[in-house]
């Protein structure tokens, strides 16, 4: 076995060197990813995801170049390319404008940090919504946004950098607006008291002393009561809002306050359905 290996090294030194470089490149990428995974456990941030992707690309390019220079044919080509570096850079820049734009935009996003891992964002281009959901990942080319239906939206960095980003979680605490309809003949002050009392019993809420219920608007069904609830974390906001929707409805019904909804009456001659 050892003799066969020595023979291969002697007869095909370029091939052996290229294989060794390829293995070292693969191992380097694995080590890089493992180091970043350890970092993610302490601090999972968007710019760290981007840097991980950039370092992997750099290692891959350097490894591929080192492998190619082991052979005489590719070595001559690489030497020629290096001698005409200005021309090559110009050609590559023109051919890969979009790719380079994504890389540059990635650095811009990493530096300014308009959003981060786990934050709820909405990406707007003019009046159109490009993507909406939770930020989960970032590479040298794109940002991954997990939408509420479970699908992932892959948005190029250049698009995100030029778009308007509505970040629900840019600052803490996190607020969520809730609304509930009540009939026109409702005792409005009593309905407000019931909503406030129900909110006071929700353990996930903070800033309870600032809670205020207002009449948001009038509809064909009745009045819309509006209030804002605050939590420390985004996940807590989802849970607290769900709990309050259920408990407020139950409390209003228990106090004989009508929550109106549309009904349809079909008149079939003398028969009414």
Image (cartoon, rainbow, N blue to C red):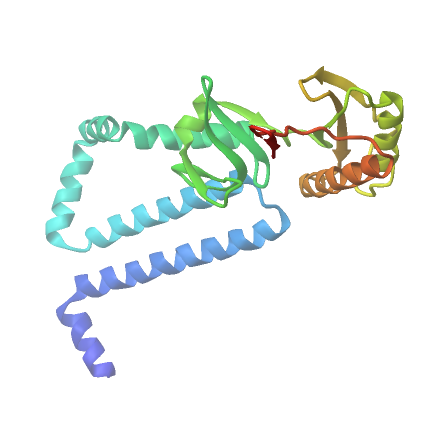
Viewer-nearest residue: 231 or 141: 231
Q: How many labels sit on residues?
A: 0
Can the viewer see residue 148 in this picture? yes
As displayed, is residue 11 above or below residue 164? below
Q: Is residue 36 left or right of residue 273?
A: left
Viewer-nearest residue: 97 or 251: 251
User: Residue at point 45% right, 31% down?
Assistant: 107
Q: Is residue 48 left or right of residue 177?
A: left
Q: Is residue 153 left or right of residue 218?
A: left
Q: Position of residue 265 (x, y in %)?
A: 61, 29
As displayed, is residue 48 above or below residue 262? below
User: Residue at point 23% right, 31% down?
Assistant: 92
Where, by quadrant of the figure, is residue 268 drawn?
top right
Q: Is residue 17 left or right of residue 60?
A: left
Where, by quadrant of the figure, is residue 271 drawn?
top right
User: Residue at point 17% right, 73% down?
Assistant: 8
Q: Residue furthest front?
A: 270
User: Residue at point 19% right, 31% down?
Assistant: 88
Viewer-nearest residue: 145 or 147: 147
Q: Position of residue 60 (x, y in %)?
A: 33, 49
Can the viewer see residue 179 in this picture? no
Q: Position of residue 27 (x, y in %)?
A: 39, 60
Q: Position of residue 97 (x, y in %)?
A: 28, 27
Quadrant in the picture for the N terminus = bottom left
């Amino acid at each position: 076995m050892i003799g066969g290996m020595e023979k291969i090294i002697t007869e095909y030194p370029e091939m052996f060197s290229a294989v060794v470089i390829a293995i070292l490149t693969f191992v380097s990428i694995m080590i890089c990813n493992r180091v970043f995974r350890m970092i993610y456990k302490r601090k999972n941030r968007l710019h760290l995801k981007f840097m991980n992707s950039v370092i992997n690309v750099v290692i891959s390019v350097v490894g591929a170049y080192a492998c190619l220079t082991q052979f005489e044919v590719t070595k001559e080509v690489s030497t020629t390319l290096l001698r005409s570096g200005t021309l090559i850079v110009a050609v590559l820049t023109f051919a890969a404008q979009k790719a380079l734009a994504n890389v540059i935009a990635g650095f811009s996003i990493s530096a300014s940090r308009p959003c981060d891992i786990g934050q709820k964002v909405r990406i707007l281009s003019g009046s159109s919504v490009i993507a909406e959901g939770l930020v989960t990942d970032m590479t040298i080319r794109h940002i991954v946004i997990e939408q509420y239906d479970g699908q992932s939206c892959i948005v190029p960095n250049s698009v995100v950098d030029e778009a308007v980003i509505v970040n629900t979680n840019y600052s803490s605490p996190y607020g969520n607006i809730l609304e509930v309809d009540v009939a026109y003949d409702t005792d409005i002050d009593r309905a407000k008291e019931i909503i406030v009392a129900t909110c006071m019993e929700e353990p996930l809420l903070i800033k309870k002393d600032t809670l205020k219920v207002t009449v948001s608007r009038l509809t064909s069904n009745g009045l819309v009561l509006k209030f804002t609830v605050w939590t420390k974390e985004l996940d807590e906001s989802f849970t607290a809002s769900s709990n309050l929707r259920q408990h407020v409805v139950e409390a209003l019904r228990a106090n004989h306050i009508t929550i109106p909804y549309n009904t349809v009456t079909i008149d079939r001659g003398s028969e009414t359905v």
